Amino acid sequence: MRASAPSKWGMTVDSLLARQAGVISRRQALAAGLTRDAIDHRVRVRRWRPLHPQVYLAAGHRVDDEVTVRGAVLWGGAGAVLSGVAAAWWLDIAERPPSTVRLTVPRCRNPRDRPGIVVRRRDLDPCDVVEHRGLRVTAHPLTVLDAAVDLGGSGGRFLDRALQRSVRFPAVYDAYCRSLGAHGSAAAGRLLTAAANGSASAAERLLVRMLREAGARGFHCGFLSNGYLIDVAFPQAMLAIEVDGWAWHMDAARTQADKWRQNALVRAGWTVLRFTWHDLVERPQAVLAEIAHAVRRARLAS
């Protein structure tokens, strides 16, 4: 029995295991020259242990995040592409991998979900697929969009950060257009609308609506003090609320101007609270509670 035979691509079993963190599929092992009996023998003597049907982990390797992801993609088989938050982690866009690995497979296939693996059927455009570290993965723009949808309430913050660091809005929008009608495309459209319009003025309007719905009184929009316009002010409480839109809209000059304005307001005796668009969307009740607390504290001190 040969320990490692070359495949038609020049890869051996040993080189595949070294390249893939100890993970190998039955198909790969057969292509590398092993017989079915040789594969079954390795499983019987526990040199290899099953991760998924037809996918094995060699002895001496522990099941870590890389093994989990590689095993899922190899189990997915022909045309399987790593997607969502797992793809974002694989591409170093997300800091941590998810507990569930999402795969995209062609519509002509219909594998069922497995524990820890969710399968979506979609025919991807070739430009939406890349190979990274030996795995087929959705390209950066589609990965960012899919991951933002998967993250739910925190997806907007994730998308905002990605637009600052790793992708450009037009590329993400193009990926969205290519995936119209696919699972999650409606949520993706809402996120992109928010990203495109997520300016400070839009966030300011959202805050005003929240305050009115909560029955707040005594606040003014665009209040002038010491030569500066305060986004939303409670003048009697000397409370200034500054509202920021999506961070990817900000530039260095505006950031510096906002710092000077905030410092000037504090020197004039104002208490300044600062919220982002994401704060208003993700934790609206906490924002309202913080504003109410600041107003009550000011009234008690007067």
Image (spheres, rainbow, N blue to C red):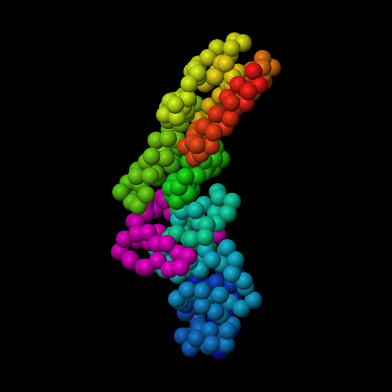
Which residue is found at the position 57% from the left and 87% from the top? Answer: 45
Front in this rendered view, residue 7 or 229 = 229
Give the farthest residue toward the front.
300
| Numbered range of the magenta stretch | 104-133
Front in this rendered view, residue 47 or 134 = 47
Magenta segment includes 108: yes
Q: Is residue 104 above or below residue 24?
A: above
Q: Is residue 225 left or right of residue 214?
A: right
Which residue is found at the position 54% from the left and 40% from the top? Answer: 161
Magenta segment includes 215: no
Q: Is residue 63 above or below residue 239?
A: below
Q: Is residue 257 left or right of residue 120?
A: right
Which residue is found at the position 66% from the left and 17% from the top? Answer: 269
Q: Residue 129: image x %, image y %?
A: 43, 54
Give the farthest residue toward the right.
267
Does the image show residue 256? no
Q: Residue 21: image x %, image y %?
A: 59, 68
Front in this rendered view, residue 159 or 241 = 241
Q: Quadrant of the C terminus?
A: top right
Does the image show residue 165? yes
Q: Residue 236: image x %, image y %?
A: 57, 16
Q: Quadrant of the N terminus?
A: bottom right
Which residue is found at the position 54% from the left and 79% from the top? Answer: 49
